[in-house]
Image (cartoon, grey):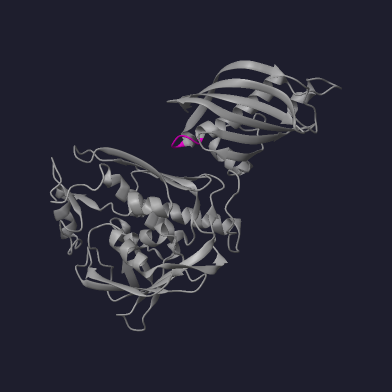
C-alpha cells in the first residue's frame, strides 16, 4: 500500500446492464481531490444527488441481503460492492462516480471489468497521506452461525470460510494478505454465484432481472451450468472475499487488521463495519494517522481482556508490544508492590514467585496462540508442560518484565514456545512451554 492518497489520472466510462434492475447503466469515473473519498452522483435524478460510499449511508433493511445499497434521502445506488472492491483493491482513495441508473453494470459478476477500466485510466499519487484504521482490539459480530471478527494484524488480511450443504459448493476456505497484486490476480476475477433453486426465488422478489450465465455462476445439484469453467478451484469463497472487501471499504479508510469471516454476507458485513466505525469514532474524532506500524501490532489491556479469560488477581500481562502472527510475541508485566502475592512472598523481602513469572510468560504466549484461531473468546489455553526452565535473578517491586516468546512448533491445537523474560535488558528467566487450545 502506498502511504499517499491516490486518485485516477483521467476520466473513464463503462456501460452495461445492471444485474438486479436489468437497466442499461453507464458509470463514469472521474478524478477527485484529496480527502474526497468515493462518491456516487445520480445524474439521472433531479438535482443530481451525491451519495458518499460510507457505512453511515447504508440503510438498515432487507435490501442488503443480496447486495450492498447506499442511500441519502430518497436517492439510492445499489449493488455497489464489486465497484467498491475494485477501488479498494487498487488502492484508489478519491474518485467521483457518475451513474445514470440505480445500479452499476454487471458484465461478468466479478470486479475484473472495473479493474480493467480503472487501470486504463491510471492512478496518480496525491499530496496527502492515507488515513488508516488500525484494529487495536478484537471487534466481532456473531449471529445465527455467522461469525465475523477484526483482529490486530501488521498489514491487511482477509480469511473466509464458506459453508454450503451442497455437493458442488461444499466448504471452502481461503486467506490472503490483500495488496494490489494479490487482488488483481487472486480475487478480482472471482464471479458471483447462485444455486439453481435460488434463481426462481430471486426473480419472484424482483431481483436478477439482468442476470444470466454471462454474469453469474449458476450451480445445479451436480455441476455448474456455465460454459466457462471455474476460474479458480475455490472461486466461490474468493468471490465472498471480494464482496467482503467491497463492504469493508465503506469504513472510508484502508484497514490494518486481520478480518476473519465464517459464512458472512452483505448484511452481516455491514454490521461489522458499523462496529468498526464506532471504534474509529471512539478512538478519535480527528482523522486517523496514516503511518503504518513499523513493527508488529501493539495491544493495550482492553484488547488483551477481549481475547484472554484471566482477570484480577491473575491477569499477569499489561500490554502486548509486538505480535507477528504465527511467529513471535512480546509483552510486558509491570511488577508493583501492590501485587497480592507480595503479602506472603515474602513479608519484608518481596520477591515475585518464579511460578508466576512462568505463568505471566505463558499468558503472553497465550495471546500469540489464540490469535491463530477463529473465535478466540470461545477458547482457553491449557498449560501442558515446562522444559528447560531457568531463573537467573529475583524479580522485585518496581521491575518491568519484558517477555519475548517465539513459536517453535504448532500442530493442530497444541504448540511449543521458547520464552525469555528480561528486566532492564538482563535475562531473568527462560523456559520452553507446551500449551493446548481447548473450548471454554
Q: Give the residue drawn at x 46%, y 56%.
A: 274
Rendered view: 183 above or below 365: below
Rendered view: 265 above or below 61: above
Rendered view: 103 above or below 89: below
Q: Position of residue 110 (x, y in %)?
A: 27, 57
Q: Does the magenta segment cover residue 270?
A: no
Image-based side of 420 in relation to 425, left or right: left
Q: Give the residue drawn at x 78%, y 20%.
A: 345
Q: Position of residue 368 (x, y in %)?
A: 54, 33
Image-based side of 394 in relation to 434, left or right: right
Q: Give the residue drawn at x 33%, y 80%.
A: 43
Q: Position of residue 399 (x, y in %)?
A: 78, 32
The total of numbered circles placed on residues is 0
Q: Which residues are magenta?
A: 371-375
Q: Position of residue 217 (x, y in %)?
A: 19, 51
Rendered view: 332 above or below 107: above
Between 199 and 6, which is closer to the camera in this rendering?
6
Amino acid at each position: 500500500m502506498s502511504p499517499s492518497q491516490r486518485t485516477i489520472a483521467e476520466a473513464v466510462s463503462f456501460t452495461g446492464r445492471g444485474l438486479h434492475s436489468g437497466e442499461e447503466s453507464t458509470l463514469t469515473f472521474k478524478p477527485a481531490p484529496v480527502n474526497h473519498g468515493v462518491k456516487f452522483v445520480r445524474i439521472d435524478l433531479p438535482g443530481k444527488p451525491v451519495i458518499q460510499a460510507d457505512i453511515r449511508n447504508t440503510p438498515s433493511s432487507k435490501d442488503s441481503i443480496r447486495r450492498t445499497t447506499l442511500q441519502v434521502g430518497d436517492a439510492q445506488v445499489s449493488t455497489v460492492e464489486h465497484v467498491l472492491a475494485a477501488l479498494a483493491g487498487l488502492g484508489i482513495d478519491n474518485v467521483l462516480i457518475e451513474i445514470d441508473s440505480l445500479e452499476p453494470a454487471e458484465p461478468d459478476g466479478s470486479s475484473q471489468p472495473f479493474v480493467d477500466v480503472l487501470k486504463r485510466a491510471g492512478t496518480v499519487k496525491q499530496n496527502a497521506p492515507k488515513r488508516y484504521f488500525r484494529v487495536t482490539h478484537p471487534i466481532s459480530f456473531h449471529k445465527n452461525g455467522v461469525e465475523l471478527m477484526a483482529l490486530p494484524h501488521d498489514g491487511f488480511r482477509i480469511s473466509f470460510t464458506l459453508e454450503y450443504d451442497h455437493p458442488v459448493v461444499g466448504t471452502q476456505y481461503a486467506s490472503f494478505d490483500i495488496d494490489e497484486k494479490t487482488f488483481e490476480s487472486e480475487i478480482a476475477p472471482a464471479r458471483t454465484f447462485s444455486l439453481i433453486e435460488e434463481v426462481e426465488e430471486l426473480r419472484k422478489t424482483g431481483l436478477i432481472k439482468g442476470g444470466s450465465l454471462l454474469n453469474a455462476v449458476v450451480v445445479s445439484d451436480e455441476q455448474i451450468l456455465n460454459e466457462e469453467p471455474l476460474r479458480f478451484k475455490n472461486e466461490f469463497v474468493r468471490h465472498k472475499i471480494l464482496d467482503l472487501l467491497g463492504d469493508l471499504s465503506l469504513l472510508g479508510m484502508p484497514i490494518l487488521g486481520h478480518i476473519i469471516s465464517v459464512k458472512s454476507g452483505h448484511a452481516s458485513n455491514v454490521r461489522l463495519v458499523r462496529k468498526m466505525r464506532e471504534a474509529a469514532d471512539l478512538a478519535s474524532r480527528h482523522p486517523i494517522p496514516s503511518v503504518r506500524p513499523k513493527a508488529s501490532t501493539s495491544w493495550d489491556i482492553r484488547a488483551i481482556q477481549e481475547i484472554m479469560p484471566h482477570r484480577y488477581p491473575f491477569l499477569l500481562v499489561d500490554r502486548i508490544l509486538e505480535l507477528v502472527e504465527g511467529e513471535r510475541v512480546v509483552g510486558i508485566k509491570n511488577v508493583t508492590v501492590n501485587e497480592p502475592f507480595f503479602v506472603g512472598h515474602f513479608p519484608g523481602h518481596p520477591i515475585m514467585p518464579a511460578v508466576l513469572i512462568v505463568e505471566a510468560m505463558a499468558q503472553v504466549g497465550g495471546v500469540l496462540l489464540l490469535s491463530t484461531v477463529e473465535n478466540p473468546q470461545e477458547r482457553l489455553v491449557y498449560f501442558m508442560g515446562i522444559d528447560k526452565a531457568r531463573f537467573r535473578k529475583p524479580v522485585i517491586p518496581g521491575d518491568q518484565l519484558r517477555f519475548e516468546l517465539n513459536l517453535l512448533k504448532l500442530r493442530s491445537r497444541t504448540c511449543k514456545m521458547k520464552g525469555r523474560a528480561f528486566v532492564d535488558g538482563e535475562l531473568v528467566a527462560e523456559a520452553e512451554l507446551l500449551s493446548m487450545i481447548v473450548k471454554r
